[in-house]
């Protein structure tokens, strides 16, 4: 709807109107390659962030709710669901012809309070079945896909010790896919996780996919979250993962892409939402602005990454950014509260960064 006005000096001189406008759009530029998505938050769904709304409809063709379909929000009490925001989002997506990826049915984090201290396996099983059946069925035919299971693996590739593994055993993953398939036959079904580009964790994801396939249970795709650092992007592992996952016959997606620029309090690249560290000025070095040297490397990082994605465009079905603009990014609050991060393609003033234009330019060269 609203484009970004690119006026070069040359155009100014050449143009008979003295002003020439060029409409740019990320999703239009990538339309022959893969879907381009963004995560959206509650204010954006409620149309309280109109600047973001303009970007969403101009640059993205796919939406993932950042939080509002997580069980703590959509299923707040044992026998009570709250679909208010999810319904609004689906309506918004329909109006603007955006594909929705439901995030997420089964995840150990952001669980409803009543689940936290649940002891009985029967109760966990009841929650599990009712939750998937109710939520997946409601949106069948209305949303494009589901992250059926999110983050079921430890870094070493074994199954994560979660309430689901503990109470239901390892078959909970195939059970979740079976139930989702039954409740929402029209949705694509995905496994989603961070760091599954790393060899050990990747092997765990491959084992999950093969296990489902050997049981005749449908899995359509695998989502690599993509919470990376701008100067530590694991290109080799990403490329190997695209190849290995696609060899299993599933679609490959990058589902939560952001390139953080701030120091990491630990030696790990995990994206576990439950990890926390304490604030210090040293850990928040770019409070007022990002130095050009970092900005340039950040642009280069995105460019190299998208070159790789374009190389494998026939295997990649979607690339989703985890937020519209820097001001809303979860990386301002995680793993340390109150920092200023710069991980996305649009800045705090909703302006496209150089990286945005470079990614568009990549699609103009063959
Ligand atoms: C994050 C959201 O962005 C935050 O707003 C929320 O406080 C915590 O969760 N992996 C996922 C996402 O699968 O759901 C997480 O989203 C980021 C890591």
Image (tube, grey):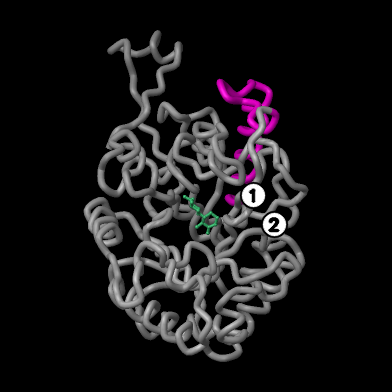
What's the residue at 39%, 56% (across, down)?
65
Seen in the picture, residue 144 relative to 332 is either above or below; the reply is: below
Figure check: 281 above or below 147: above
Q: How many marks?
A: 2
Left or right of 216, for residue 141: left
Question: In which quarter of the view is residue 323 placed?
Answer: top left
SS under mark 2:
helix
Q: Is residue 362 visible?
A: no
Q: Residue 286: horizontal and vertical position, in percent? A: 61, 25
Circle 2 crowding by C-alpha within 10 Å: few under 14, some 14–19, many from 20: some
Foreground of the two, 117 or 42: 117
Residue at 45% x, 85% y: name it: 123
Alpha-carbon span between mark 2 and mark 1:
7 Å
Look at the numbered disc 1 and say if its residue's Cβ is closer than 8 Å to ligand 1: no
Quadrant of the snapshot with the C terminus: top right
Q: Earlier in the sequence, mark 2 or mark 1?
A: 2
- Magenta region includes residue 349: no
Where is residue 62? Give x, y as percent: 39, 54
Residue 239 bears which disc, if any?
Answer: 2
Q: Mark 1 sits on what residue?
A: 308
The foreground one among 144 and 331 is 331
Name the spot of residue 340 as percent of width and height, x first.
55, 32
Q: Are marks 2 and 1 in contact (CB under 8 Å)?
A: yes
């Amino acid at each position: 709807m609203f484009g970004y006005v690119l006026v070069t000096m040359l155009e100014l001189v050449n143009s008979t109107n003295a002003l020439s406008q060029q409409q740019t759009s990320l999703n239009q530029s990538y339309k022959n390659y893969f879907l381009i998505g963004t995560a959206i938050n509650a204010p954006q769904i409620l149309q309280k962030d109109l600047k973001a709304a303009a970007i969403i409809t101009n640059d993205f063709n796919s939406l993932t709710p950042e939080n509002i379909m997580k069980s703590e929000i959509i299923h707040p009490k044992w026998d009570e669901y709250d679909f208010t925001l999810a319904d609004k989002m689906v309506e918004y997506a329909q109006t603007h012809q955006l594909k929705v990826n439901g995030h997420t049915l089964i995840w150990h984090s952001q669980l409803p309070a009543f689940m936290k201290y649940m002891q009985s396996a029967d109760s966990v099983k009841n929650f599990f079945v009712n939750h998937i059946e109710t939520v997946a069925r409601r949106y069948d035919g209305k949303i494009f896909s589901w992250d059926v299971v999110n983050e079921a693996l430890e870094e070493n590739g074994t199954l994560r010790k979660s309430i689901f593994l503990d109470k239901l055993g390892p078959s909970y993953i195939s059970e979740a896919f079976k139930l989702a398939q039954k409740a929402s036959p029209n949705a694509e079904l995905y496994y989603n996780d961070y760091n599954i580009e790393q060899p050990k964790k990747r092997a765990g994801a491959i084992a999950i996919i093969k296990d489902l396939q050997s049981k005749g249970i449908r899995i359509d795709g695998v989502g690599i979250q993509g919470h990376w650092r701008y100067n530590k992007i694991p290109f080799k592992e990403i490329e190997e993962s695209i190849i290995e996952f696609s060899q299993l016959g599933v679609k490959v997606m990058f589902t939560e892409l952001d390139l953080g620029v701030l120091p990491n309090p630990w030696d790990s690249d995990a994206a576990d939402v439950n990890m926390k560290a304490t604030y210090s000025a040293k850990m928040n070095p770019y409070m007022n602005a990002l130095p050009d040297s970092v900005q340039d490397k950040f642009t280069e990082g995105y460019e190299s990454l998208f070159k790789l994605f374009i190389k494998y465009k026939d295997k990649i079905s979607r690339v989703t950014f985890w937020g519209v603009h820097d001001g809303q990014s979860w990386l301002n609050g995680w793993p340390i509260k109150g920092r200023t991060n710069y991980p996305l393609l649009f800045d705090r003033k909703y302006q496209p960064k150089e990286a945005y234009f470079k990614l568009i330019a990549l699609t103009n060269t063959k």
